[in-house]
Image (cartoon, rainbow, N blue to C red):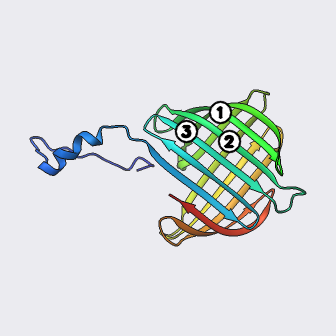
Amino acid sequence: MKSGMARLVHYQNFQPGDNVKEVRPVLYNEPWYFKTEAEIFSNMTEGALTLSNTRIMLDASWEVGWHEVDEEEWEGIAQAGWYLNRFTSFFIGARIEGVRSKEHDTVGIFGLSYLLPLNIDSTAWIDNEGESRIILKKEFELTPRIGIKGEAEYDSLEKWEGAVGLEYNLNRHLSLAGKWHSDFGFGGGLQIGF
């Protein structure tokens, strides 16, 4: 469906059954959905909490790394977004960075997310200090249980960062995974999603 392969078939003079007529008004509501994803590895952890409906998205994400760095580094992003269409959304929010338990930089961000051809997720933003960031992400499902994903990020202040991961789905909510991150090296662990 994400790649546009869904189709609606409608027959003239068709009357749905009573059970469909009962639930049809509920289908046109705009319910809120909650989604969480967390990756817990031996070298780092990252994840996101998302609350959204068809037009509005509230999102909080984190990344914490402790391997191959002098001190534990972390970043948190909180944002509110608006879907323009299935390809494009805009967002505004804040990015907070720190080392160990100390915060050392907080900036406001404004950006755009766009679904590129080949289902590549792209995000670009500019912050209130004039710095910018571009992120490209792609996931490949190799088999129903095995997937690979990659991410490339360019930050005008910190330059390039990237990650590649391999995952094995144990069930719908839990995966075993390994990940290489350009700043934090190799690690293995779990991915959890609800």
Residue 62 appears at what percent x and percent y? Answer: 68, 49
User: What amino acid type should be assigned to the residue bearing mark 2?
Assistant: Ile
Please say if 15 is above or below 36. above
102 and 77: which is toward the camera = 102
Please say if 122 is above or below 85. below
Labels 1 and 2 touching (C-beta < 8 A):
yes
Q: Residues within 10 Å of mark 3 (few under 14, many from 20)?
A: some
Q: Which residue is mark 3?
A: 58
State the residue at coordinates (70%, 59%).
45
79 and 141: which is toward the camera = 79
Q: CA distance from mark 2 to mark 3?
A: 11 Å
Q: Is residue 163 left or right of residue 23?
A: right
Location of residue 68 by image quarter: bottom right
Q: Which residue is mark 1?
A: 93
Q: Is residue 17 left or right of residue 133?
A: left
State the residue at coordinates (50%, 38%).
87
Q: CA distance from mark 1 to mark 3?
A: 10 Å
> Any mark on residue 77, and which?
2
Q: Would residue 17 be seen by someone viewing this image from the given angle?
A: no
Please say if 187 is above or below 139. below
